[in-house]
Amino acid sequence: MVPCDSTATREDVERLVRRPDGSAVDARKVFIGQNVPYRPIDPAQADARLAGLPGIGSDEPFVLNVGSSLRRKNRDAVLRIFARIKDRWPAGKLVFAGEALPAELRELSVSRGAAARVVEVVKPDDAVLEALYNRARALLFPSRFEGFGWPVIEAQACGCPVLCSDAGSLGEVAGDGAFVRPAVDEEAFAEGLARVVADDAARARWAEVGFCNAARFTADAMLDQYERLYDELGALPPR
């Protein structure tokens, strides 16, 4: 039996993994629970955690992207989407948290006229990342593929609206708690992002449904599912 963290991962296991006799393995979906208890924090506390970071003032709004610069993470699309709305949102910035941007993405930010408004927070610790989720106007995550997609749940647990692709596991993990579109539909992402960053009521609605969705992914719920799997395995005759 192979526990898998999403339907997409389960389908990959069923397609790729075989027992020695050639038969399919028994793959089961078990959603993983948050391993860091991200949550809403006081705005002053968030500002204090971010005070030492260059490029992020306490009164400066920003959109957040979290992760690496692997091709599947689609950070080039993040830059293009932000560039589409930058003139409609002149005060806003784009923050990349995680891996530093490679030269080609920095060059793309220059060619799109957005370089002065791009901020990199390289390898933030959990406290800084929690503050970024709390301060961000939205998480923009148009990934080309994810086996689960931690940033979606982490952002929602902090009350940060999420705009993500439907690739891989993301549609299932984001549920009804995010603005979900195909990764290639950058125009739709730009329009959705423009509404969220400009409309406090829209942002509050996405924050509320995100909270509800993130509540599905707790450590207790994960452990309950594993306990049931072990009980099932224990009841099987020896092979």
Image (cartoon, helix red, strand yellow):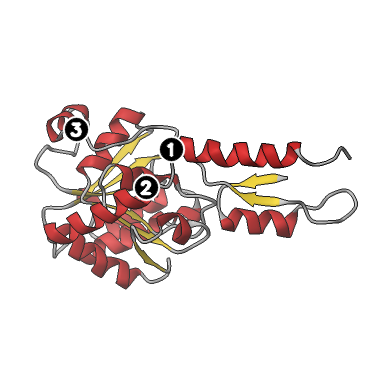
Residue 146 position in % (x across, y down): 51, 53
Q: Nearer the viewer, residue 237 or 215?
A: 237
Indicate the secondary structure of the residue bearing disc 1: loop
For the residue pair 56 and 137, the one nearer the viewer reads as 137
Badge 2 crowding class, 10 Å Cα cut-off, few under 14, some 14 to 19, many 20 or more, is: many
Q: Which residue sits at x=50%, y=54%?
A: 71
Q: Residues within 10 Å of mark 1 (few under 14, many from 20)?
A: some
Task: Describe residue 54's horizontal placement relative to residue 147 as left or right.
Answer: left
Q: Amino acid at mark 3?
A: Ala
Q: Which residue is mark 1?
A: 34
- Residue under numbered circle 2: 214
Callout 3 environment at 10 Å: few (<14), some (14 to 19), or many (20+)? Answer: many
What is the CA distance from the residue labelled 2 to the residue labelled 3? 20 Å
Dot 2 amino acid type: Ala
Nearer the observer: mark 2 or 3; the answer is: 2
Give the mark nearer the N terminus: 2 vs 1: 1
Q: Nearer the viewer, mark 1 or mark 3?
A: 1
What residue is shown at x 26% (from left), y 48% (from top)? 160
Q: CA distance from mark 2 to mark 1?
A: 9 Å
Query: Amino acid under label 1?
Result: Gln
Chain-order first, disc 2 or disc 3 = 3
Which quadrant does the C terminus fall into? top right
Q: Is residue 179 above or below residue 98?
A: below
The residue at the point 17 percent across, 58 percent down is 197
Cα separation between marks 1 and 3? 20 Å
